[in-house]
Image (cartoon, coloured by chain):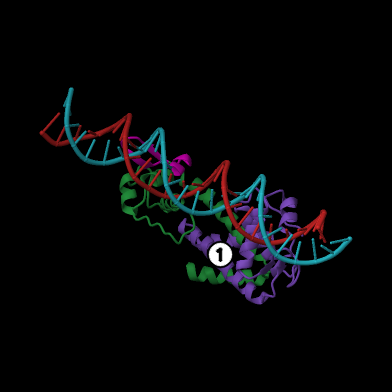
Chain colours: A green, B purple, C red, D cyan
Amino acid sequence: MFISISNIDPRPLYEQIYESIKSKILKGELKPGDALPSIRQLAQDLKISVITIKRAYLELEQEKLIITRPGKGCFVADCDISEIASLSLSEIEQQMREVVRKAKNTGVSRKSVEHIFNKVLEEEY
Amino acid sequence: MFISISNIDPRPLYEQIYESIKSKILKGELKPGDALPSIRQLAQDLKISVITIKRAYLELEQEKLIITRPGKGCFVADCDISEIASLSLSEIEQQMREVVRKAKNTGVSRKSVEHIFNKVLEEEY
DNA sequence: TATACTGTATATATAATATATACACAGTAG
DNA sequence: CTACTGTGTATATATTATATATACAGTATA
């Protein structure tokens, strides 16, 4: 499991970890039944506290993406990937809307927004 | 000066106020030399603390967008709007990049991202 | 000089983030 | 059965970000 955290990223550590694992589930790198790294192991690898990992896992558990077996470990839940993907999609739409709104709100023209988007799309995809 | 804050908005109050005023400067609603509302007046209007307004103004001051005259008030600085606009533009590009990256990172196809963008653009512009 | 505006400084409360450390459950080697 | 080593859990605490109340100081003017 390659999970990385960054101090440059303004998001809290637990959120970065949460996101990272959720992404792996969505991309099929982690399948239902697969074991997640133990919170101790991951804490050691990332050189952060067990509690912070616990919190990330807690969020995943509350979204029913993983299940926790005390004394055994944490495992990817038998969840419906397409449903999760659909939720992620509307999350992305909302974030996209925020960016576009902000652009409009700072006097950026529609043409400029389109230009920025196309440039970014080329560079990232 | 119509500035609104929202508890739904996850950003801190001081940041919402900062953004709101910066936007007005960028859109030319506030011009160099114009007086900003006094921190007391604005605090009263928004029903929040003077200190929170102060903090928003402090950020604006540190970016040299406004100047503060103790005992007199705060005023829009004699700043180069085009320069500020250019900075805002790269900020927007970066946020756009984050959204696109996240989309890619959750398995969303390029086509889908384009579709979302176009939809949002139609709705917001 | 009184007063009525400005912004400022100090001390404090609350919540979010991250931690250390001690505890409890599961499986297994002896 | 016991001891051990792995798992997750609970409690108490530190640090930082956000927001506040209240008392202080500068500026203008009636």
Q: Is residue A59 left or right of residue B29?
A: left
Amino acid marked by disc 1: Met
Q: Pinpoint residue B89: horizontal percent, then vertical percent.
A: 60, 70
Residue in the picture at 54% in, 59% down = B112
Chain bearing mark 1: B
Q: Residue B17 sits in which quadrant? A: bottom right
Q: Pinpoint residue B69: horizontal percent, then vertical percent.
A: 70, 67
Can the viewer see residue A101 in this picture? no
- As rendered, which of B32 and A34 lies closer to the eye? B32
Task: Indicate left or right for B100 with B26 as reference.
Answer: left
| Side of A113 relative to A13 (left or right) | right
Mark 1: few, some, or many residues within 10 Å (few <14, many ≥20)? many
- Image position, residue A32 (x, y; %): 38, 43
Secondary structure of the residue carrying numbered label 1: helix
* Above or below, B18 relative to C12: below
User: Hey, which quadrant is residue B85 in on the image?
Assistant: bottom right
Could you say which is closer to the camera, residue A27 or residue C11? C11
Q: Indicate the quadrant where residue D1 lies.
A: top left
Q: Between residues B42 and A113, which one lies in front from this camera angle?
A: B42
Q: Relative to C5, is A81 above or below?
A: above
Q: Which residue is mark 1?
A: B96
Q: Quadrant of the C terminus of chain B?
A: bottom right
User: Looking at the image, which residue is at 61% across and 74% down?
Assistant: B86
User: What is the magenta range?
Assistant: A58-78
